[in-house]
Image (tube, helix red, strand yellow):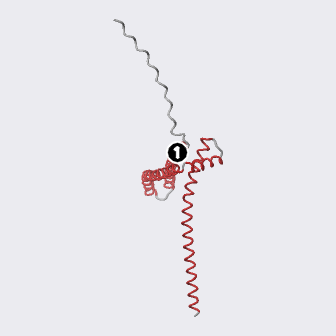
C-alpha cells in the first residue's frame, strides 16, 4: 500500500514538473514573440535618434522622441530600412569571412612554416604574435568599412523618412529669350 502511495505521489510530482516545463516553454515563446519586435523597433528608434542628434542638433531625449515619432509615422519605410540593413549586414559579414579566410590562409602557412622550422621557440611565438596583429588589423579595417557603410545607409534612410533626401531638384532658370531675328533686306 505504501508503495502505491509513493508511486502515485511520484507520478503527481512528475506531472507537476512536466507542467512547469510547458509553462516555461510557453512563456519563452511569448517572450520571444514580444521581445523580438520590441528589439527591432528599439534599434530603429536608436538609429533615428543618433541621426537626429547629429543632423537636427537635438538633445538625447528630444532625439529619442523624434525617433519614436518617425518610427510611428513611417512604420513601413522604417521596417523596410531595417530589413535592407539586415540583409546588407549579413552579406557584408559573409564577405568579411571570405576576406579573412583569404588573409588567414597565407598567414597560417607562414605560421606553420615557422613552427616546422623553429618548433616552439621564441622566434615562432614572435612571428605568431606578428601574424595575429596583422589579422587583427585586417579585422578592424573590415569592421570599419562595414560600420561606415551602415552609418551612411541609416543616415540616408533618416533623411529619406524626414523628406530631406533626395534633395529637391533645383528650379531650372527660365531659358533666355532668343535675340530677334535679323530682318531680311528689302528687294
Please name whichever residue, 94 or 74, is drawn nearer the observer in this view of the structure. Answer: 74
The structure residue drawn at horizontal position 52% and vertical position 45%, both measured from the top left corner, is 157
Above or below: residue 60 compared with residue 181:
below
Return the residue found at the far bottom.
1
Measured as percent of width and height from the top left, residue 46 is found at 59, 50
Measured as percent of width and height from the top left, residue 103 is found at 44, 50
Q: Secondary structure at mark 1?
A: helix
Number of other residues with Cα within 10 Å of mark 1, as a class: few under 14, some 14 to 19, many 20 or more: many
Please name whichever residue, 104 or 122, is drawn nearer the observer in this view of the structure. Answer: 104
Please name whichever residue, 3 or 177, is drawn nearer the observer in this view of the structure. Answer: 177
Return the residue found at the far top.
187
Measured as percent of width and height from the top left, residue 104 is found at 44, 53
Return the residue found at the far front.
187
Q: Quadrant of the C terminus?
A: top left
The structure residue drawn at horizontal position 49% and vertical position 59%, both measured from the top left corner, is 120
Q: How many labels, in total?
A: 1
Q: Quadrant of residue 41?
A: bottom right
- Decide if residue 47 is on the left or right side of residue 114: right
Q: Quadrant of the N terminus?
A: bottom right
User: Which residue was labeled with disc 1?
Assistant: 157
Measured as percent of width and height from the top left, residue 139 is found at 50, 50
Amino acid at each position: 500500500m505504501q508503495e502505491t502511495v509513493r508511486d502515485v505521489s511520484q507520478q503527481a510530482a512528475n506531472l507537476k514538473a512536466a507542467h512547469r516545463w510547458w509553462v516555461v516553454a510557453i512563456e519563452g515563446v511569448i517572450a520571444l514573440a514580444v521581445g523580438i519586435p520590441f528589439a527591432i523597433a528599439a534599434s530603429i528608434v536608436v538609429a533615428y535618434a543618433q541621426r537626429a542628434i547629429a543632423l537636427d542638433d537635438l538633445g538625447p531625449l528630444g532625439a529619442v522622441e523624434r525617433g519614436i515619432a518617425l518610427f510611428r509615422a513611417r512604420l513601413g519605410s522604417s521596417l523596410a530600412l531595417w530589413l535592407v540593413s539586415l540583409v546588407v549586414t549579413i552579406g557584408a559579414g559573409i564577405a568579411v569571412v571570405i576576406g579573412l579566410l583569404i588573409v588567414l590562409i597565407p598567414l597560417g602557412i607562414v605560421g606553420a612554416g615557422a613552427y616546422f622550422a623553429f618548433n616552439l621557440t621564441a622566434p615562432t611565438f614572435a612571428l605568431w604574435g606578428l601574424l595575429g596583429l596583422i589579422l587583427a588589423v585586417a579585422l578592424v579595417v573590415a569592421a570599419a568599412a562595414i560600420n561606415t557603410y551602415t552609418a551612411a545607409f541609416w543616415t540616408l534612410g533618416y533623411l529619406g523618412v524626414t523628406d530631406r533626401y533626395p534633395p529637391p531638384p533645383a528650379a531650372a532658370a527660365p531659358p533666355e529669350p532668343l535675340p530677334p531675328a535679323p530682318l531680311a533686306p528689302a528687294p
